């Protein structure tokens, strides 16, 4: 019980006051760190956003960052089942799309956790103000394409934007990526398999530090509906602790599907 309480105490950073606020993991607040160098840049495809550079010399994880960054394959992947029993019945009752609802709740949880905003650029680490889900969409002839959806905290706005982006991606599938953007989270869904393990392809040169999130085919066990869920991340930027915080918050949101109607 003590460990669970510890994991749930996630530090979320209050943008308006530039200070750390321990708010028990509020998924609605943006992330700012107190050991950063602010700089405003234009993120290609995303307009002008605040980009902050981590002061690695003052970072408590600097030794871990250098240690894992020196490895040939610095990524780790965690897979676990999440309970979607309440969510599934709620979505059916309110006629809401399953994929987009899970995507919103996942992106909301990830945006609430500081480490999911970190990206490696050369020998520096940037902290993005917001991270958008970049998803795979299956189109005609069983060919998938990529599309990016702007993350919006308001669920109704996000679901509407997702519907439009997915429709466009199905009509005009492409795997051309905007390689200049790393302010994203890569998502994929494999609804044909209830997997227990998953590994994503990545570039190692230059380093790829974008987290990958996936889910598979849900199944029934003990009167509950369970969804296989996977998180892959660069170990130089986060540990199993941070991925565990994501899983805990994500499950809390799945257990409160009413947030989709806020």
Image: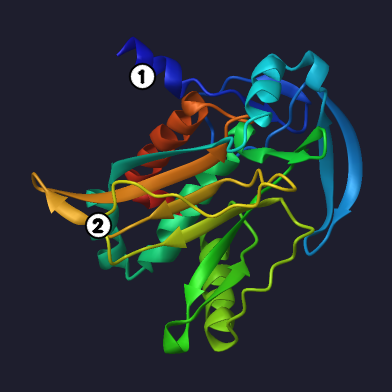
Q: Is residue 130 left or right of residue 16?
A: left
Judging by the rendered image, the residue that carries numbered circle 2 is: 218
CA separation in Å, label 1 and label 2: 25 Å
**Which of 83 and 58 lies nearest the eye of the viewer?**
58
Tell which tag, 1 or 2, sits nearer the viewer. Answer: 2
- Vertical comparison of 36 with 63: above or below: below
**In the rendering, which numbered label is found on residue 4?**
1
- Residue 136 image point, x, y percent: 51, 68
**Which of 248 and 198 lies nearest the eye of the viewer?**
198
- The quarter of the image holding the N terminus is top left
- Residue at x 83% of width, y 42% of height: 51
**Which of 201 and 1 lies nearest the eye of the viewer?**
201
Earlier-in-chain disc, 1 versus 2: 1
- Residue 8 image point, x, y percent: 44, 23
Can residue 58 be seen here? The reply is yes
- Residue 227 image point, x, y percent: 28, 51
Q: Label 2: how many residues lie within 10 Å, few (<14), some (14-19) or many (20+)?
A: many
- Residue at x 54% of width, y 69% of height: 162
Can residue 261 be seen here? The reply is no
């Amino acid at each position: 019980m003590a460990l669970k309480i510890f994991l749930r105490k996630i530090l979320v950073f209050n943008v308006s006051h530039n200070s750390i606020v321990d708010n028990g993991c509020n998924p609605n607040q943006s992330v700012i760190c107190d050991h950063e160098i602010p700089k405003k840049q234009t993120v290609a495809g995303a307009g002008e956003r605040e980009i902050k550079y981590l002061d690695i010399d003052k970072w408590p994880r600097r030794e871990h960052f250098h240690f894992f960054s020196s490895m040939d394959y610095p990524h780790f992947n965690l897979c676990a089942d999440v309970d979607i029993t309440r969510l599934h019945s709620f979505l059916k009752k309110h006629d809401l799309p399953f994929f987009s609802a899970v995507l919103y709740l996942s992106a909301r949880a990830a945006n609430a956790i500081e480490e999911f905003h970190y990206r490696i650029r050369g020998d520096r680490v940037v902290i993005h103000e917001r991270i958008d889900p970049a998803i795979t969409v299956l189109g005609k002839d069983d060919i998938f394409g990529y599309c990016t959806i702007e993350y919006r905290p308001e669920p109704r706005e996000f679901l509407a934007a997702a519907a439009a982006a997915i429709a466009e991606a199905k009509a005009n599938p492409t795997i051309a990526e905007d390689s200049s953007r790393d302010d994203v989270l890569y998502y994929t869904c494999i609804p044909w398999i209830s997997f227990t393990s998953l590994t994503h392809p990545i570039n190692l040169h230059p380093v790829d530090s974008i987290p990958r999130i996936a889910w598979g085919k849900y199944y029934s066990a003990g009167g509950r509906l369970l969804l296989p869920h996977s998180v892959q991340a660069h170990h130089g930027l986060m540990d199993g602790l941070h991925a565990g915080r994501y899983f805990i918050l994500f499950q809390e949101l799945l257990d409160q599907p009413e947030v989709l109607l806020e």
